[in-house]
Image (cartoon, rainbow, N blue to C red):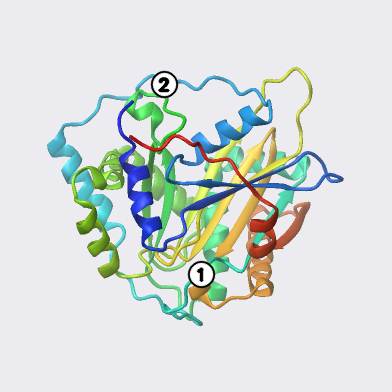
Amino acid sequence: MAKDWSGYKYRIFKSLGLNVDMIFAYQADEKSAMQFHLMSHEFNDGVGAIRQLCEDYDFALPQPAIRKTRPEPSLLTKLKLLKKHLANAPAIHYAWKKYDEQLEGLSPSLEYALFDLSSSEAIRQYCKKNHIGETALFLSALDKAACGQLLSKTDQRSWLLPHDFRRAIGQQRNNSNVTAPLNLLLNGPQDAGSIFKQIKSLYRQDILWGAWLYTNFSAYLPRVVIAYLFKRMHKPGWLGVFANMGRWKSTNDEDISGHWISAPPAAIVSPLTAGAFTWNDRTAFSLQCHASLKLGPEDISVLMQQWLTVLSAELGFDINVHQHSITMAELIKTADRRDTTQQNA
């Protein structure tokens, strides 16, 4: 197997004090406790992690397609696309209402929201009717809520959207990082339709090949150079990360319901991190805020509530969703770690 250079990059970041733990959790039904798991980005991206977890839970998943979707561009074209990718994440001085770059540490809590089956299906039908993707719909609501609560003005901002890149390279590598991060640059107020058009335009440009080159930069730069560049990097680089895991279905003979939640790491380079996960047609959100945003658990809960309120207004109907919160200290205390024991070569 080829070396996981992206995972090696996360190992360097971890040595510099950056949080690289993804959070996953499964709840079988409303009467069951949420089971939390920590998975380090050193060894896996979100897709690889959830496949490993589903295997541990004996949840069968369909085999993914690994056929390349289109020919791989030349190195020169990739370098041009890398330039475009970097242009979508310029150094931005955000107009924070509260912020202290000297504050370190994890998000004080994890906020999550569990949608019922009917609301999840209604969202799917809404996106189908309006010809937009769920990522654009969820992100537009999150963006409005975040700008309203965290920023004094809605100016230029950049979001990072991880994208599974396995089909593009024609390889199915589960225990590995095979994610190309899409930089989405927004200016002023944006609705779901405009965000969807921008994402679609970036995909059509094959910009993810530039992102793939970027995320594997540790293959080309010495460790000491990476550490130096990270320390000098303008922080935060992005307003936040939004990772939509998409829709997953088990192929077990018996009915497997419940909810999975997924949460990318919250770090000073991307202080707001949110996730979406639809498991057997039931959708769930997650939300974290890095310590530098100076938010307490109550503030994060309000931000999640605002995200759901904006989403409901966009949909034009009330959604049935249960909102929950757990302190990070309690989560870490109760979570198990399911990392692979095999170090990257």
Q: Secondary structure at mark 2?
A: loop
Question: Residue at label 2?
Answer: 66
Query: Residue 9 in the image: x percent, y percent?
Result: 33, 49
Q: In the picture provided, is 288 more to the left or to the right than 8?
A: right
Q: Amino acid at mark 2?
A: Ile
Mark 2: few/some/many CA within 10 Å (<14, 14-19, 20+): some
Residue at horizontal 42 percent and vertical 68 percent from the top? 188
Quadrant placement of the C terminus: top left
Query: Seen in the image, is 70 located left or right of residue 159?
Result: left
In-front residue for pair 208/202: 208
Residue 201 seen in the current view? no
Q: Is residue 172 above or below residue 154?
A: above
- Residue 134 locus on image (x, y percent): 56, 44
- Quadrant assignment for the N terminus: top left
Residue named by callout 1: 105
Residue type at mark 1 is Gly
Indicate which label's residue lies in the foreground, 2 or 1: 1
Rendered residue at 64%/52% (across/down): 285
Residue at 36% from the left image edge and 62% from the top image edge: 16
Q: Nearer the viewer, residue 294 or 74?
A: 294
State if disc 1 and disc 2 touch (CB < 8 Å).
Answer: no
Q: Nearer the viewer, residue 36 or 15?
A: 15
Mark 2 or mark 1: whose residue is earlier in sequence: 2
Q: Quadrant of residue 228?
A: bottom left
> Is 270 located above or below residue 175 in the figure?
below
Give the vertical position of 252 relative to 128 (above or below). above
Q: Residue furthest left?
A: 76
Q: Residue at x 56, y 32 (%)?
A: 52
Q: Residue furthest right?
A: 31
> Quick one: 49 or 94, which is closer to the camera?
49
Query: Can the viewer see residue 204 in this picture?
Result: yes
